Image (cartoon, rainbow, N blue to C red):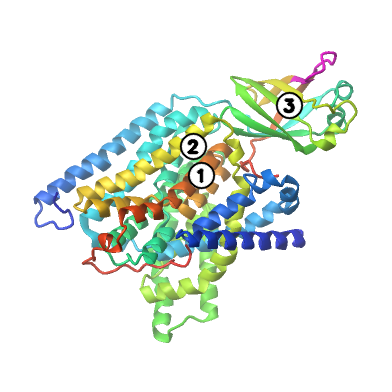
Amino acid sequence: MSSLGVVKGPMSRAGTTFILAYAFLVALPMVGLIGVLKSGRTLTAPISVNGVWQLQADPVRLAALPCGKTLAENPNTTLAISQSGKNFAVSLSSDPKSTFSGVLEGNTLKALLVPSPAWSAEAGCGDGRELSLVATIDPKADPRSLVGLLSVNQCPACSSVEFHAVRQTPRARSGGGAH
Amino acid sequence: MPNLFTLVLQIAVVLAACRAVGELFRRIHQPRVVGEMFAGIMLGPSLLGWVAPHFSAYLFPASSLGFLNALSQVGVVVFMFLVGLGINPKELKKQGHAAVLTSHVSITAPFVLAAFLALYLYPRLSDDSVAFTSFALFMGAAMSITAFPVLARILAERDMLGSRLGTVAIACAAVDDVTGWCILAYIVVLIRAAHSSSSIWMTISGILVFGLAMIHGVRRLLRGFERVYREKGALSENLMALMLLLVLASSLFTEYLGIHLLFGAFLMGAIMPKESKFVRYVLDRFETITVTLLLPLFFAFTGLRTNIALLKDPEMWMYCGLIILVATAGKLGGSTLASRLSGMPLREAVGLGTLMNTRGLMELVILNIGLDIGVISPALFSMMVVMALVTTFMAVPLLDLICPAQALCTAPQKVTVPEVSLQEIA
């Protein structure tokens, strides 16, 4: 193998090897890159739900739901969603220590909330109860909006509560670490 | 107003953790900076927040993170100035075609492979608020970066700075970093322009004018610093303050233009005079406080944003493994292949590839920008942090394996030894 470090003439063997190697290892991949960027434009990523959402629900019906009193008492509750592809985490402004984790299936959001110990102290909220959130996103609405149901697992007698949420701002990414 | 008690407590805990873990890593022959990066992750939700959530919430309440971030960003601004100061692109010219080919391949190979990987990851880890082009270009830039300071440190510790391998590695890393930052600047402009009312062409024109003014105008004025240093053997406190002011002004200008504070700091460092004694003198003045106090805060802040728990199922770990594999294949493989084609012996070529594969702190800086501008998701951020840690950690053991006897990889360089500095940073 000849060294490319010393070039004796414009058409020396080393110079030719350099040009060939450069074309093969640098120029050609750059052409490939353009192809990748073009073909990637046809890909679709999951719909964006990242951001802060203002939650609106009937406070009376919410208060009647086990674990719903905390939400009903905070009419300005927001959901902060941190999204990674189809997976997302949600924290509630009314109780930041409780977090949902969920998945996106098309335009449908599904998440389960495990109430924090403080929230679980609410009457009827203990015994490992979880809040379930199922909602559909309207991707064409600007700002984006959610319509869905909040229900409580392990409580067949409890009725679900409808809610509506409007995205306030796409959230600046904070990673998963901010408490 | 920040809660001073909380802030000082945070700084104390971060410093203690970084020094302790850094020392542990030093004992296993790893650069201290690798240990400090690990310490940052340990202080975040991946370990402390998981093992002791209440203590973690007490120590790092959400309301305090803004102040910690601000302090850490000041540290990174100074750090990027020092990185720019330590880089001398002219060194590449001295190395001939071999280094030109190696440096360019060490950018294009990981860049293109990352773009291919983006085809797979975009539908899985991104969302429709991010354009594929931005996503793919960011992945490319993040994977093609090399941790210039860590690389310099490893070479210095192994007494390889004057070797052919060392000089080519330093020259290539310099080119990689400058190129990587230019690409990243373009991505930031693209993304910010999408959310801004001002035209992208106005932004690009502003950046070009600023760059030209810095390179052809300010650069000449900066020679005055070197002249004073040559005449007096030192710079007065006023001149050092002026230098710092210029760094801050440049940073503010790039932030105003719609790129990022760090680009201005890096550019100011890059256009500073490169006389080796002058560079060493400036580094000595700024390094200690940056390295011992401010950078650990950046590691901690990065750690607080990194949540390994987001990689909760085997599928996510598979993505993470793929990222590490592609990053290593592109950087290590690409650099090795190009340097081998350039006539470097196989052992040295693999050694060069290994060195180029260290991403370290530079990667964390880029990833934080990516997360801030929303081009990567929290889970992808965590995966990329793991990749940065793994590729940086593997460098020393791999070099031990490739060059068990130092003489095997220290063929002397015929060309002048470059002005390597920043050794203390890593």
Circle nearer the viewer, 1 or 3: 1
Query: B370 left or right of B328?
Result: right
Expressed as whole percent of the image width and height from the top left, the position of residue A126 reads 85, 28
**Residue at label 1?**
B386
**Residue at label 2?**
B320
- What secondary structure is marked by label 2? helix
**Residue at 41% from the left image edge and 63% from the top image edge:** B153
Identify the chain of the residue marked 1, using the numbered disc in the image.
B
**Residue at label 3?**
A165
Residue lying furthest bottom: B232
Expressed as whole percent of the image width and height from the top left, the position of residue B366 reads 49, 49
Expressed as whole percent of the image width and height from the top left, the position of residue A12 reads 9, 51
Determine crowd level at label 2: few under 14, some 14-19, many 20+ residues with C-alpha closer than 10 A. Answer: many
Would you identify the image quadrant in which residue B290 lies?
Answer: bottom right
Q: Can the viewer see residue B249 in this picture?
A: no
Cα distance in 3D space between marks 1 and 3: 35 Å
Determine crowd level at label 1: few under 14, some 14-19, many 20+ residues with C-alpha closer than 10 A. Answer: many
**Magenta-colored segment: predominant secondary structure:** loop
Lower position in the chain sequence, tag 1 or tag 2: 2
Cα distance in 3D space between marks 3 and 2: 33 Å
Depicted A93 relative to depicted B39: above or below: above
- In the image shown, does B188 or B155 lie closer to the viewer? B155
- Let me know if residue A155 is in the magenta part: yes
Q: Are marks 3 and 2 on the same chain?
A: no
Amino acid tagged 2: Cys
**What segment carries the magenta color?**
A149-161
Q: Are marks 1 and 2 in contact (CB under 8 Å)?
A: yes
Q: Give the number of the disc on residue A144.
A: none
